[in-house]
Structures are given as structure tokens and as C-alpha cells.
Amino acid sequence: MATDYDAPRKTDDDSESIEALKERVPDKLSGAVDSEDSDNPGFELAGADLSDLDLDVVVLPPQADEFTCVSCFLVRHRSQIDHESKLGPICRECSA
Ligand SMILES: [Zn+2]
């Protein structure tokens, strides 16, 4: 039962590759963190802002009095519709 527990070669391989990784990662990380810390203090804020905007746009559903132009794919008010094409409504901006 417990005879299959010996696998010294596998363990050796693992520790070897991990060692190789460890030698590279700290070098890269320290360099990146150093330059980001001093050069881009607002990087995190910009990322948060973007995700916020993304959520807002995605959540917005087309209302009953709105349509999605099949040419520019923008949601517009019905008053902005120019005509219905075979594919769907076209806004005034796109038909102009
Ligand atoms: Zn359009």
C-alpha cells in the first residue's frame, strides 16, 4: 500500500524548476515594483475608474422608448430614428 510513496526524482525535478523560477521572479518583481512605485502612483486608481465605467455601460438596458442603431450600435431615443432597415433601425446620424 505505502510502497508507491517513493518518488525522489519527481521531487528533485520540482525543486529544481522552482529554484530556477525563484531566481528570475524576485529580479523582475523588484524592478517592476520599483519603477511603478516611483513613476506611476495613480496607476491603481485609473484601473478602478475604468472598471467602474465599464459596469455602468454594461448595466444600462435599452428602454421601451429607445432603440439600438444597427449601424453605430448606439442606444438612442426613438425621436432619433431615421428609418427601419432590413437589419433594424437606423439613427439619423448614420443615415445622414
Ligand atoms: Zn447610428
Image (tube, rainbow, N blue to C red):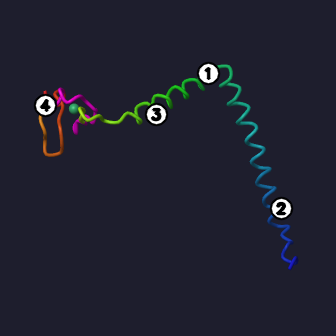
Q: Earlier in the sequence, mark 3 or mark 1?
A: 1
Q: Which of marks 4 and 1 is nearer the N terminus?
A: 1
Residue type at mark 4? Asp
Quadrant of the frame with the N terminus: bottom right
Residue type at mark 3? Leu
Q: Which residue is label 2 attached to?
A: 12
Give the Cα distance between marks 4 and 1.
47 Å
Residue range (magenta): 68-81
Quadrant of the frame with the C terminus: top left
Q: Which residue is label 3 attached to?
A: 55
Q: Which of marks 4 and 2 is in front?
A: 4
Q: Is mark 2 on a helix, strand or loop?
A: helix
Residue contact between numbered discs 4 and 3, judged by CB atoms under 8 Å: no
Left or right, 95 with respect to 15, comes to left
* Crowd class of label 4 (few under 14; some 14 to 19; many from 20; radius 10 Å): some
Q: Position of residue 22 (x, y in %)?
A: 77, 45
Q: Is mark 4 on a helix, strand or loop?
A: strand
Q: Which residue is label 1 attached to?
A: 40
Residue contact between numbered discs 3 and 1, judged by CB atoms under 8 Å: no
